[in-house]
Image (spheres, coloured by chain):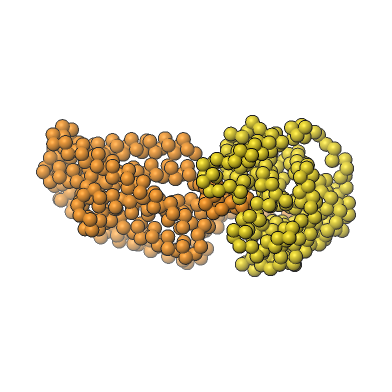
Chain colours: A orange, B yellow
Amino acid sequence: MRDNSDARTYPMTWKKPPYIKNSYIRGSIYFFSALYLAAAFGTMDVNWTRVAEGLPRAERFLDAFFPPNFADNRGVVWDGIQESIWMAIISTVAGICLSVPIGLGAARNLAPKYIYLINRAIIALSRTFPEIILAIFAVKLFGFGPFAGFIALSIGTIGFYAKLLAEDIENMSEDQAEAIKATGASWFQWINYAIQPQVMPRMIGLSVYRLDINFRESAVVGIVGGGGIGATLNTAFDRYEFDTAAAILLIIIGIVMCLEYFSGFLRKRVQ
Amino acid sequence: MLRIEDLNKKYPTGDEALKDVKLEVPKGQVMALIGPSGAGKSTLIRCVNRLVEPTKGKVFLGELELTQLSRWKLRQARRRMGMIFQEYALVERLTVMENVLSGRLGYVGFWRSWFRRFPGKDVREAYRLLDRVGLMEMADKRADELSGGQRQRVGICRALIQNPDLLLVDEPTASLDPKTSRQIMRLINELCDERSLAAIINIHDVLLAQMFSKRIVGLEQGSIVYDGPPEDLTPEVLTRIYGEENWEATIGKVEEENEEEDSTISEAAS
């Protein structure tokens, strides 16, 4: 460790080493990405006359929306909302109940390899299909109505919640887990004392977030026959009752915003 | 109390963490295990309670052979071995009381622990231990509200409430300041004396090891290269354990440092 700094000259410039070392590969990635993007935008066929025709139509549409009609003469809006809230709540609860064992099994640091793979496959499968596709299946299987929507949303919840739970468990502190294991705790006690306290705050926040998503999705699954406010909204459009449709949309926005605020508040509190 | 015979551990990466380690710790002895980082100190104590599975060799706790135990039997055996960790390893979002009581998990059923309904004598013992280490008022605080020294004392309570025969202590002072380190080491020693517990203390601070234990074992690259009293730790021995360095300042002065500032812990104890 001799100080020979006098004997040498040191460079006065320094550049951060590039993430991709090979300059040839780096260059071609930039080049082809740019080329593809240019070509992709170039092929998009924008018909400006149709856009021009569409704008006044949008104006007529908006005119029909206003003023929103909250009168709800046949009581269908209120029924639809109640049904959606009910669907959102029970599908969230059922989905989370199913997610907990699947999430535990899908955490690499808890489960043996084959259980891990099975559970990861379940999660991957339920994530592959968006709620609307699941709802189409469920309607085909169980017929029109909120039960189909409930099934679709529950399965969608598994893909979301179990995956995030598994990832949270994989990121937990090994020390704490080791310490509880060293006391001679059983597996379930270990989960309860070492894992649960570490993942709980995030999981509570995510469950409210999922409730929010499920409420919004209930409007979508209703359009394909899954019941709830979506069915009401669809009917309103079909009957050209745009003022009622506007009222429904505003109510959905209102409820989603309330849930959003509530989940943010809750997440802050449970940290 | 503890007998280790020809213990080997080879990690899947090919690292040989332990090579034919033979070690015996009698009842009531506090033994310090020193050695450079990566020498296998942590692996050694984790092979005893099988948080790490040894590759070969035998470990006896009293008459019980640990390495062949079934999962159920292993759980029961782990109750007899309290462990104290480097970064305290408290469950941070649980209360101090829950952390202490978690030392009883091996003794109570699942539903009791789930509802936090521990037997009265466990709760009393938890309070007694917390009082002993001067943290009676902290029982309902969350573990992450405590300072480093306080957390380590909770960690000690958690290990002791198991009512163990052996303490496995992994770098208890590595994250603490020098004064708190001494207090913690003194506390561990006092408690081992009171209960005539055997203990293995991994520690990389040679001076602390000399101050607080009567037997020092040096581990280097998975093999024991020194086993003897603290007075015999000469520069030659330290070089054998750690490699070439100027050791003159590290050794000696054991007696002077021992009677230092009185700690809050000793006050709380009396």
Q: Give left or right: position of A41 versus A266.
A: left
For residue B152, say whether it is visible. Answer: no
Q: Residue at x 64, y 62 (%)?
A: B69
Q: Residue at x 21, y 49 (%)?
A: A145
* Relative image position of residue A70 (x, y in whole percent): 18, 33
Q: How many marks?
A: 0
Is A64 situated above or below A227? above
**Viewer-proximal residue, B62 or A21?**
B62
Which quadrant, please, contains the C terminus of chain B?
top right
Q: Give left or right: position of A40 versus A5.
A: left
Q: Give left or right: position of B228 versus B17.
A: right
* Relative image position of residue A109 (x, y in whole percent): 53, 57
Q: Residue furthest left?
A: A239
Quadrant of residue B222 in the image? bottom right
Q: Residue at x 82, y 49 (%)?
A: B213
Which quadrant, please, contains the N terminus of chain B?
bottom right
Q: Give left or right: position of B67 versus A245.
A: right
For residue B136, say whether it is visible. Answer: yes
**Viewer-proximal residue, B77 or A78?**
B77
**Viewer-proximal residue, B69 or B235?**
B69
Is B82 situated above or below B179? below
Q: Residue at x 80, y 51 (%)?
A: B29
* Relative image position of residue B228 (x, y in whole percent): 85, 56
* Relative image position of residue A258 (x, y in whole percent): 33, 35
